[in-house]
Amino acid sequence: TNRTFTMIKPDGVEDGHTGAILDKITASGFRIVALKKTQMTVADAQAFYEVHSERPFYGELVEFMSRGPIVAAVLEKENAVADFRTLIGATNPADAAEGTIRKMFAKSMGENAVHGSDSDENAAIESAFHFSGREMF
Ligand code: GTP
Ligand code: MG
């Protein structure tokens, strides 16, 4: 069993998909270890996405991710990181497989409804960015 980190991004929250997305996540076998609604400041989003700071879409990404509340969660399941990325689908919803969260709820390459960590190491870093030890169960 291991863990991954996810955020329902501002578009998913604004569009009222929080409940449906969490339901799909738990129905797919993920256990919720930590969960909260929060909003990233511009500085938070810049730090969280530091790895993308040289990419042309960085400014747009930071503005988008800080524009409204998100729902952050730590999830547990065997093979959590890879299985969660399968569940959310491709970054661009146009390429996302049928039945994936991005196919169902994402609008575009930028506004793609959910985040999923890309490695065990980043899952731990991203979880610690949003949650203290006392918030994870
Ligand atoms: P995350 O789970 O959110 O990390 O997505 P990902 O791993 O599928 O994609 P990646 O880490 O490469 O990019 C991070 C995020 O940047 C994406 O989820 C998008 O929200 C955004 N992004 C990536 N490419 C583009 C782009 O070409 N244009 C815009 N506007 N946003 C992009
Ligand atoms: Mg990524």
Image (cartoon, rainbow, N blue to C red):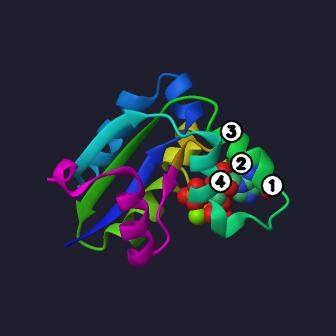
C-alpha span from label 2 to label 4 = 9 Å
Magenta range is 115-137
Work out how far the residue at label 3 is from the one at label 2, CA to CA, in angstroms.
5 Å
65 lies left or right of 120: right
Callout 3, which amino acid? Phe
Could you classify mark 2 by the number of other residues whose Cα lies within 10 Å: few (under 14), some (14-19), or many (20 or more)?
A: some
Q: Residue extending furthest front? A: 43
Q: Is mark 3 within 8 Å of ligand 1?
A: yes
| Secondary element at image label 2 | helix
The amino acid type of the residue labelled 2 equals Leu
Give the amino acid type for the residue marked by disc 4 in the picture.
Gln
Residue that appears at 32% across and 51% down: 131
Q: Pointers 3 and 1 in contact (CB under 8 A)?
A: no
Residue 134 appearing in the image:
yes
Quadrant assignment for the N terminus? bottom left
Q: Note whether ligand 1 is within 8 Å of mark 2.
A: yes
Q: Is 25 situated above or below 17?
A: below
**Residue 130 on image: x %, y %:** 39, 51
Asked if the residue at label 1 sits under 8 Å from ligand 1, the reply is yes
Splitting the image into 4 quarters, where does residue 57 fall?
bottom right
Residue beneath the point at 28% across and 56% down: 75
The answer to whether 50 is drawn above or below residue 131 in the figure is: below
Q: Is residue 76 magenta?
A: no
Q: Marks 1 and 4, how far apart in space?
A: 12 Å
- The residue identified by callout 1 is 57
- In the picture, the disc for residue 64 is 3
Residue 123 placement: quadrant? bottom left
